[in-house]
Amino acid sequence: MTTDFTHQTYLSPFTWRYGSAEMRHIWSESHKRRLWRQLWIALAQAQQVAGLITPEQVDDLRAHAGQIDVDRAHQIEAEIHHDLMAEVKTFAEQCSVGGGIIHLGATSMDIEDNADALRLRESLDVILDKLTNLLAELASQIERWATTPIIGYTHLQPAEPTTMGYRLAQYGFDLLTDLAELRRVRDGIRGKGFKGAVGTSASYQELLPPPPKSPPLKRGGLGGGKFSAAQLEAHIMTAIELEPFPVATQTYPRKQDWLVMNALAGLGGSLYKFAFDLRLLQAPSLGEWAEPFGRKQVGSSAMPFKRNPINAENIDSLARMVAALPRIAWDNAAHSLLERTLDDSANRR
Amino acid sequence: MTTDFTHQTYLSPFTWRYGSAEMRHIWSESHKRRLWRQLWIALAQAQQVAGLITPEQVDDLRAHAGQIDVDRAHQIEAEIHHDLMAEVKTFAEQCSVGGGIIHLGATSMDIEDNADALRLRESLDVILDKLTNLLAELASQIERWATTPIIGYTHLQPAEPTTMGYRLAQYGFDLLTDLAELRRVRDGIRGKGFKGAVGTSASYQELLPPPPKSPPLKRGGLGGGKFSAAQLEAHIMTAIELEPFPVATQTYPRKQDWLVMNALAGLGGSLYKFAFDLRLLQAPSLGEWAEPFGRKQVGSSAMPFKRNPINAENIDSLARMVAALPRIAWDNAAHSLLERTLDDSANRR
Amino acid sequence: MTTDFTHQTYLSPFTWRYGSAEMRHIWSESHKRRLWRQLWIALAQAQQVAGLITPEQVDDLRAHAGQIDVDRAHQIEAEIHHDLMAEVKTFAEQCSVGGGIIHLGATSMDIEDNADALRLRESLDVILDKLTNLLAELASQIERWATTPIIGYTHLQPAEPTTMGYRLAQYGFDLLTDLAELRRVRDGIRGKGFKGAVGTSASYQELLPPPPKSPPLKRGGLGGGKFSAAQLEAHIMTAIELEPFPVATQTYPRKQDWLVMNALAGLGGSLYKFAFDLRLLQAPSLGEWAEPFGRKQVGSSAMPFKRNPINAENIDSLARMVAALPRIAWDNAAHSLLERTLDDSANRR
Amino acid sequence: MTTDFTHQTYLSPFTWRYGSAEMRHIWSESHKRRLWRQLWIALAQAQQVAGLITPEQVDDLRAHAGQIDVDRAHQIEAEIHHDLMAEVKTFAEQCSVGGGIIHLGATSMDIEDNADALRLRESLDVILDKLTNLLAELASQIERWATTPIIGYTHLQPAEPTTMGYRLAQYGFDLLTDLAELRRVRDGIRGKGFKGAVGTSASYQELLPPPPKSPPLKRGGLGGGKFSAAQLEAHIMTAIELEPFPVATQTYPRKQDWLVMNALAGLGGSLYKFAFDLRLLQAPSLGEWAEPFGRKQVGSSAMPFKRNPINAENIDSLARMVAALPRIAWDNAAHSLLERTLDDSANRR
């Protein structure tokens, strides 16, 4: 358990009690700003190819990419009330050569939204990895108990015999469904791309050398040209290995966040069900299953002999929180004026 | 507007004000019982092939399949407190030859759950049909207004120019995502199959002639044999053109309902957003768009000149209800003891 | 079970399976329109006192108050797309003398919102009545089992002894809290009053004889005068025994609906908990409690011997729906542009 | 902005961006453990009066009450997997005289639940204080703009004139309702009391000298005697100025948390509505209102001239999260097996 934070203030349980190290890293301010800087560099590289800026400028940015200084950025933000512009200025202070061209032609959401898409994808990769391991372990348990007869319960009443492996296979099937959903959502993650203030790419197009004859605004807002805004975007998105949405406003469609939250809530629901059943089955009157129990573990402060299914209870408690997330994402998606994603949401094991 | 119901009692707005005729039909008691009878007939047919019952019995059932008598069924239910068994008895009263073999070896959920899966699929087909039409119409509007410049708003503040077609394309893209989700969910609809009380198919297996050597309970509970319970299920499900889940308890995994509700909530969210934007844009100060307005339509009882976006408001109001449905389905899926699906949920246009 | 509705169409379960007769009556179209007419008559009476209309006109309205004709109203609505104005016209057609002065100076929400407040109050009275009976019955059970020892469970693990009466007292205490909440909410129900289009009472004031000297719009919008709009409102609201909100826009504050839904959800939560515990305790392994079971009742279509806690399961299923209602009401309250209340929400036992 | 935490890990926005200093303090681990120790001392004091322990032991506890050592406690917890017992041991290590009698006769929830009730009350006091200030400020604005005419909007369509003060009064009335709800809930906050493992106080009673004649378990489980468990509880609760629930299981009824969350969600809804309206009215086309804008503030990284209502947007974004909390609390209250409160929920400004 790390101690590089203080318990003198409120800390989310995900900061210290429940979150995994990978998730805490992905959803840290430092990592976010590191991604922002990667995106600015990718933008600068593409603009260099288009002849707008010099290789030296790009090199300068690249040299200082790792110098995240959240304190300095917050200092600037306190003055200008704009967190991304504060990071631009922090980065620019560090880059005497390239500082002036950071964020050239971009709107905040060209950076923030692509970074968020990357963070969502990173988070889903962590979850998929853990879920795959869980399923492999569960599969071997299903095999192991495939023919062990147990009594099946309906309405909590003993009904007909079934097998332990068959019961486990129910959880397995639910989790397989979740795995498929999570994979599909993960593979479908797209960034906003670099489309500027209202998604028309106009600000990028204006910076580029004019093509022979081009209408100011074609379908999808991406004008043609020798090196068009569309090509600029393609160049950047290839560099960061993220497919862009074909259309976007200032942001990517918030439906994407909702789809991610749904997939997480689905997983939460399967784990909730499994944990809830375990709690029922750990009751001595049923007495079939039990969580592992540490040798020095204390059951209860008043009744230390007790074997409470605390992990299962934690799973159910957390799953209830996850179940609330899709609705928040739906609200964000449904209200066209929305402003921010829910950065505390994806912190799942 | 039909009048074969009375306004002396509470009626859901979906019964008379908002539901489409197709949806009302699909979610009527009559239709549900018609599907139940189809399933009993498919079961009987398969059991005839297995040599358990006679062709005359099946023919008798088939002859009376259409005689739905909800009143009689409710009469019986008042006594035995079991709605499906009441329908079995109602059907049996009508079938002097085949009445005795209805529901042979089955548990209620072998009938109800497969019928619900069929109703969900029928509902999704209605929605997909309407959504496809909507998208075709929207596509032609996107083409039509592709280059018409309008001002883009961010934070409700005028920002940069965009085009009308490009804005419409945002809604279109959201709806395309919904279409893909709905199609995927629709194509993935599966029934419980015919697996008996706790999903092991034991009750069907017992009725079948024993195979030379077969363990009472193999993987997945589907024993072998000359004509196994697995083959019986395959026979029925082919007849009703519905794929079964490979594993099930007494019910199919409630995660399926949740996936359907999610897909509907997604569509609701896109329509909500579109309608909400329309309401903003119909405000005279913006004044860009407006709903059609009937020639005799009254704007307001106090201010008849007003042009209120009542369709858009209705869409948003209904969408808020739809947004609440996934959570109910999640609850059902997460609590392993669950008992009933939410039959009033899919009533969407 | 009545049969004055048809099962050829979708019917909400509250229309036939779950709703009480009182609730179905309160939330019927007929009853709503009866209340509308009462409000129009109360308005006319007050305007008669103010000298705006004649006693004969009021008498004419009173004479036809009971002639609800939903079919005719729907016919008119199909043309003018305004349900309340359609009822005005239907009522007016019936009243040759007073027809012309119905709804004089009013906006739709002066009628609809006050009627809805009355319906909410009527519904809460039904629920309070039933809940009071339930608590009386529970109290006698608490007394009866006050010293009967049972084992207490924590984490579903047997812990220390308690008494049956003490356990029942927990449910009782929760329900007492609900009773207090419901009573408080019921007693706090207020109507919009008669404040016109945007809550300023201007339209009523204009009809009244001008006072000697009165500013066009004073605090709260209620101007002075010999017989002011404020007095007109007071006259009406006294007649219908409903206190008005001191301020309102076109509608009463939707926070009121949310408070009602919360109180219902609270009751739903207590019943859910009780029913859920009962389901656990009815499991034979615990085996302490059981629902009554009818002599001819069928436990399961496959296992008729089983004693499933179906009432408890129904309670939990319905409670899940009730738990979703506050969020919908919150949405309505939070979005200032809201248009309709949730007429299917209060249908509870 | 403090920097005694690190941005290398995930931090809840309430830890650094949005939470107030008071709230962060109340919901810190340190403060929670400080309250735990206060409760142990109050328990010890009462047990001293009952003659169970010595004044020296109580004095020893009191002397070390302030030595919170979260790191040591986490070290112990890592071994015994029980956070409260880990704090008992940490505290006991510090108290050579009184260490052995900490938590005498208590169950964890006698400490945790009373501490949580105190934290809820402290939080509500912070919020009530801020809300009272807000209302005072709003009241003066209502006075100030009482007669300033503006146009009223219904359905976002200009309707009839109203006044600025009257519009503000709508928000004021909503907030007054919230104030009343919050005060009522705050004044109703009760602790579990000291009732032991399953709420019967048996463990305390056993420690006390037996009364002349006392049934082992009377109504409410609180036996009589010279110094009864009921008197012990009364002694402690008076000392910490918190009324106990008359009945409790191992925990206080979770309905209390739900009532608190509701009151917060109500406030969130009013603020959401106000902020949403402000965002509409700040649109230049309406252009009536605007947020203050710092002199150096940057409107947008691409369009620095813009005046985005960022505070209002933040309010709406946070309110959406608050709106999700009651449902989580409802789940906890409705599932009788619940284990933990949601310690990250009350963090509001």
Image (cartoon, coloured by chain):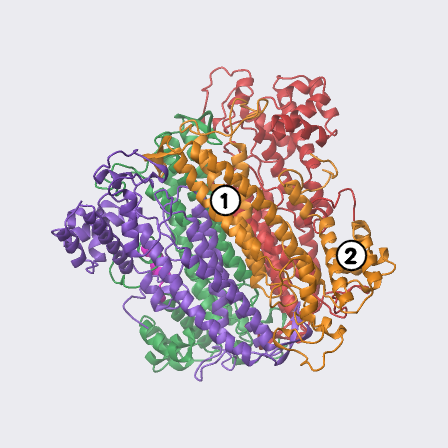
Chain colours: A green, B red, C orange, D purple
Q: Residue at x 75, y 73 (%)?
A: C208
Which mark is on residue B331?
1
Asked if residue D3 shows in the view, the reply is yes
**Please, what is the three-letter code of the amino acid marked with disc 1?**
Asp
Number of other residues with Cα within 10 Å of mark 2, as a class: few under 14, some 14 to 19, many 20 or more: many
**Please, what is the three-letter code of the amino acid marked with disc 2?**
Glu
Which mark is on residue A217?
none
Q: Residue at x 62, y 39 (%)?
A: C18
Q: Position of residue A109 (x, y in %)?
A: 48, 70
Q: Is disc 1 on the same chain as disc 2? A: no
Chain ID, mark 1: B
Q: Position of residue B157 (x, y in %)?
A: 57, 76
**Residue corresponding to mark 2:** C87
The foreground one among C51 and C279 is C51
Q: Is residue A28 in the magenta section?
A: yes
Secondary structure category for the residue under label 2: helix
Furthest-left residue in view? D96
Image vertical order of residue A69 relative to residue C43, above or below:
below
Please, what is the dominant secondary structure of the magenta stretch?
Answer: helix
Secondary structure category for the residue under label 1: helix
The foreground one among D320 and A261 is D320
Furthest-bottom residue in view? D295
- In this image, A338 relative to B32: left or right? left
- In this image, D260 relative to C71: left or right? left
Q: Position of residue D31 (x, y in %)?
A: 28, 60
Q: Is residue A120 in the magenta section?
A: no
| Bounds of the magenta segment | A21-29
Asked if residue C328 shows in the view, the reply is no
The foreground one among B197 and C313 is C313
